[in-house]
């Protein structure tokens, strides 16, 4: 038995106007300073005012790869403000932080670090509800119950979450995606792709998630290059915004795998943007899992119209197609191309291996690497060498 849970989703042009239909008195807007600068927070406040929610406090201190410290600070502010709505406006970092803040606000008796996938019965929603408004097209955080935070003291990313922290409402409005610069569009788009591919091939894959994951992969291959090359292409923007949410709904209920474990480790140590890191490792992870998921790599290949001669060659064909897509949008294909010196990689190898082997995404990986294999994966990814072990 398994569970499939997603928030209510309002999507398409002018989805933001649904805020005017909320019932409440006070909203706590979790965001970052860039969203304030772009005027997006003002747009949210306008719609909240139409709903009669005139008390709106803004917490704009969320950083990329949000920390436990930032979350705890936000919870303290919330306890004084006492909102009945938390509005998460931003990318995955903001949305993850908002999920954690809402949980900590409603259940201060439970440490944030203890929120785990099989912890249920939190009773969230009684004191306040959560609405997520994604402004990037990649993480799918608006549709998942996962929370990724950084523990600064231990220099590691923590994969947290529970079905109970899921947002009540998600608004997928492409107007916000149009503000993304090409680099962010590419980074987040590779994140959506990785979610779709890994969600379809994880050991928790299931019939309900499979179609969502494959459709997300198709949309990314078709529309990501257009969105990167022309940010004003609103059809591409809308399709990628939808793809990110669809991938979130899919992998959020089937989990990710090895590329995420490796990417989390690299990002925590070298501060590589999440989507760029997991996208970099995706082809290497596919090659490492070539036999464990041979038939599934062929299915993904067929879905995006690749010529797959047989299942044994499917992983190599798919990995090459992903590298071609990534290269076309100026994404790094190796750790070296990501700007990390070899000496720095060697100096931090023990930490990278430790972080990877402790990552929760390995639980749903079809072939779990040993510490020796994990180190080899990092070295192969540095040298841009196809995995042959």
Image: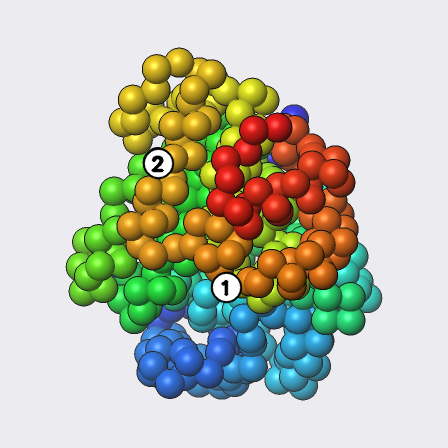
Query: Disc 1 vs disc 2: which is toward the camera?
Result: 1
Tell me the CA gap for discs 1 and 2.
23 Å
Is label 1 in a helix, a strand or a loop?
Answer: loop
Q: Residue at x 78, y 57 (%)?
A: 114
Residue 128: give x, y in percent of width and height.
Answer: 59, 68
The residue closer to the viewer here, 233 or 123, is 233
Name the quarter where the C terminus is drawn.
top right
Q: Position of residue 35 (x, y in %)?
A: 41, 78
Instruction: Say which of 117 and 8 sits in front.
Output: 117
257 to the left or right of 38? right
Q: Is residue 334 left or right of residue 377?
A: left
Left or right of residue 361: residue 295: left
Query: Where's the N terminus, which quadrant?
Result: top right
Residue 153 placement (x, y as % from top left): 78, 71
Give the label on residue 10, or none.
none
Left or right for 180, reference 107: left
The picture places residue 256, in percent across and down from the top left corner, at: 57, 41
- For residue 341, above or below residue 278: below
At horizontal 19% and vertical 61% (from top left) the residue drawn is 230
Residue located beneath label 1 in the image: 339
Q: Which residue is mark 2?
A: 321
Q: Circle 2 — which element?
A: helix
């Amino acid at each position: 038995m398994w569970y499939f849970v997603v928030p209510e989703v309002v999507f398409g042009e002018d989805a933001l106007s649904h805020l005017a239909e909320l019932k409440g008195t006070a909203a706590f807007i979790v965001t970052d300073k860039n969203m304030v600068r772009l005027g997006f927070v003002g747009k949210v406040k306008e719609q909240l005012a139409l709903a009669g929610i005139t008390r709106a406090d803004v917490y704009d201190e969320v950083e990329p790869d949000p920390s436990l410290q930032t979350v705890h600070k936000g919870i303290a502010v919330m306890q004084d403000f006492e909102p009945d709505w938390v509005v998460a406006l931003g990318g995955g970092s903001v949305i993850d932080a908002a999920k954690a803040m809402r949980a900590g606000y409603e259940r201060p008796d439970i440490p944030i670090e203890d929120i785990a996938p099989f912890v249920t019965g939190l009773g969230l929603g009684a004191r306040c509800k959560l609405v997520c408004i994604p402004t990037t097209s990649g993480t799918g955080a608006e549709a998942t119950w996962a929370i990724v935070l950084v523990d600064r003291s231990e220099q590691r990313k923590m994969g947290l979450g529970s079905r109970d922290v899921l947002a009540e409402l998600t608004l997928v409005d492409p107007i916000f995606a149009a503000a993304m610069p090409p680099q962010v569009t590419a980074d987040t788009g590779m994140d959506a792709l990785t979610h779709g591919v890994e969600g379809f091939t994880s050991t928790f894959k299931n019939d309900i998630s499979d179609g969502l994951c494959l459709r997300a992969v198709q949309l990314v291959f078709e529309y990501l290059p257009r969105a990167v090359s022309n940010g004003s292409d609103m059809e591409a923007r809308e399709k990628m915004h939808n793809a990110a949410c669809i991938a979130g709904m899919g992998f959020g209920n089937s989990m990710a795998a090895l590329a995420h474990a490796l990417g989390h480790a690299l990002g925590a140590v070298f501060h590589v943007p999440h989507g760029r890191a997991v996208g970099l490792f995706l082809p290497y992870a596919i090659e490492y899992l070539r036999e464990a998921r041979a038939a599934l790599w062929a299915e993904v290949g067929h879905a995006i119209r690749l010529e797959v001669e047989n299942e044994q060659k499917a992983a190599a064909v798919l990995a090459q197609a992903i590298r071609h897509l990534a290269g076309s949008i100026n994404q790094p294909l190796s750790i070296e191309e990501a700007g990390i010196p070899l000496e720095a990689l060697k100096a931090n190898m023990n930490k990278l291996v430790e972080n990877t082997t402790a990552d929760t995404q390995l639980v749903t990986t079809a072939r779990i690497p040993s510490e020796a294999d994990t180190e080899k994966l990092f070295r192969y990814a540095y040298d841009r060498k196809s995995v042959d072990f």
